[in-house]
Every structure is written in C-alpha cells, then in structure tokens.
Amino acid sequence: MDLRKAQELWDAEPGWLNTASYGLPPRPAWEALLRAQSQWRHGSTDWAPWDESTGRSRAAFARLTGAAPGDVAVASTTSYFMGLVAASLPPGARVVAPEVEFTSNLFPWMASAEVSCVPLDRLADSVDARTSLVAFSLVQSATGEIAPVEDILAAARAHGALVAVDATQAVGWLPLDATRFDVVACSAYKWLMAPRGAAFAAFSPRARELVRPLAANWYAGGGAYYGPPLRLNGDASAFDLSPAWFSFVGAAPAMELLLEIGVERIRDHNVALANRFLAGLGLPPGGSAIVSVDVPGAADRLRAAGVRAAVRAGRVRASFHVYSTEADVDLALAALTGPA
C-alpha cells in the first residue's frame, strides 16, 4: 500500500509527535473496536469472534518480527514476560542491563537476580562468564538510541548468556529478526497502535525450555475450564495470559495495516521526518524515529503551539510515525526556533 494513501486512514490532529508514549489507531482498528464494544453493550455475540483477533494479532506480530506464530505468546504487558523469565532463572543468576533502561525491563530482573547496570555502550564489554542474561531495549525510550545489537549478541554468544530484548519502541517501525534473540517482548500500544492491554513476546527454543509457566491459566491450556490434570499448550502459547479481548480487537487491524504498508517503508518515512526535525535545529541526522533534544523552554513552547511531545530525562522527546507529516515537523520547528 502506498504510504501517502495509507495516511488517509488516520485522523491525527496536527502536532502529534508522541508515538513513543502511545500510538494513534488507524480507522479500521478504531471502527473494529467500536463494533466490538457495541456488541458487548447489547450482548449480541459470543466472545469467540473477539478472540479471533488474538490469533490474528499473534500471527501479525510473528510476521513483523520474523518469528513463527508458535513461538509467540500474548499477554498485557512487557513486564509480565520479563518477570516470567526472571523468576525462572536459577539462584544466583547475574543479569547485565543498561543503567538508563525503562523499568519494565529492569525491575523484573532486580526482583529475582543480581543485576549489574552499565552504560549502554559498555554493555557488550560487561558480559562475562558469570553472566546469565543480558537485558536491554532495542530502542531506548528516553533518547531513541538504537542498541549496538551485533556487539551484544556476539558477547552473549561467546559466554552462553541469554538475551532478552524489550522491543516496545521498535516493532512497527524498525525491521528486526526476533529469532536472533531469546526473548523479544513488546507492548503494542505504541508503534503497533493498539489499545493498551495487548503485548507479545517471541521465545527461542532455549528460552522456552527455561521458562516455567508461573501464570498458567485456562487460555494457556487450550481452553481447559475445570479441574486437573495440568495441561498446557505445546508451544509458546503455554505462556499466554487470558487476553483483554478489546485490546486485541484493535491490535489486529492496526498491525495488519503496518504489514500492508511495509516496515521498511515506514522506517524510511519516520527517520526522514526525524532528520528533518534535527536539521531544523542545526543538529546532525540520526537513524531513529525517536529524537531527544535540549532546547531551553522547549516543553512550554511546544505546548503553546499545540505540539504534543514528551519530556524524558529533562529533554524534549519527539517521535515520528506513519501518520506524521512534514507539516507536523515544521509546526514543531516554528515553535522551537521562532521568537520566544
């Protein structure tokens, strides 16, 4: 699908530069959600049609990340997946993580293991024979920095360490191959533009052997409603949580639209807008859809101009997605470079 034609499927108000906080639904996703909520209101259907969206979403996430659908589990949050892996690590496990890391991929490890926090650019060098697992965000939430994946993977392989990646700020705009990692977890309400309450994780065979199904439930057991024995699905869906149906009803059409447009095309569009923004501030280009800038009074100036961005770590964070336009960028630049 042509990207400019696809942009007609969104109803974004000018100045939305905050997808790193939450993404905006395309019209097919919004309308599907409204239909499901109307059905709920009137009791006009069983829940099974809503749950079909969970399977569609699982398949879409697999295609977006290069995983097999059977390697993908569904839940509601990234921290659930990371906590599941963390609680399955052996006693005395050592985890290495960036010192500036989103807490959903930090606190679960701290609750269950010894964690060493180091600068992101020293992460690979800090992996040694005592390291059980390396945890990091593929794209950093605060800055948009893309992790040095090749170096980290090489160090982890050399020492036999597992690799758990939070891809929440990546999937949907940055192409990736989930099969290169042991765990790739993602909350879908940002770049996948789903309602909050849908999350996915792809597990490697090694990770599936390690992880215990500590939240085993009817959904992970193939719909086993009552009584023993314990019976769980034979693939990664053994780690599923019972889905928040409406979140997946909105997720499926949004993710399928991303696939139809093409992630590489979206990446090029997003990064071009980010670089237009940086150039307008006299800054060098980057390779991320998220940028962090230090401009005096920026938050107030953007707010006054009707531009919605975020402040993280004391800096203004702007993020650009498929529905973002050059006009959005120029509106922000006029606010930041014009008279105070």
Image (cartoon, rainbow, N blue to C red):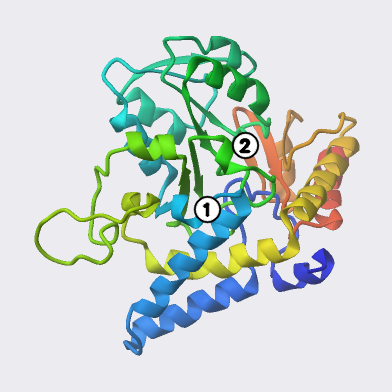
Does residue 40 lie above or below 340 as drawn?
A: below
Point out residue 22 in the picture as x, y percentages from the top left corner: 57, 52
Q: Is residue 192 left or right of residue 225?
A: right
Does residue 93 lie above or below 292 as drawn?
A: above
Q: Nearer the viewer, residue 61 or 100?
A: 61
Point out which mark residue 311 bears: 2
**Within 10 Å of the Cα at label 1, are there few (<14), some (14-19), or many (20+) other Cα atoms?**
some
- Discs 1/2, front: 1
Q: Nearer the viewer, residue 228 or 252?
A: 228
Point out residue 298 in the picture as x, y percentages from the top left corner: 73, 36
Q: Residue at x 82, y 67 (%)?
A: 2
> On the rendered image, what quadrant is the N terminus found in?
bottom right
In this rendering, the count of numbered labels is 2
Q: Residue at x 58, y 70 (%)?
A: 253
Point out which mark residue 68 bears: 1
The amino acid beneath tag 1 is Ala
Q: Residue at x 86, y 54 (%)?
A: 326
Real-space CA distance between mark 1 and mark 2, rounded to the nearest whole angstrom = 37 Å
Q: Is residue 72 left or right of residue 110?
A: right
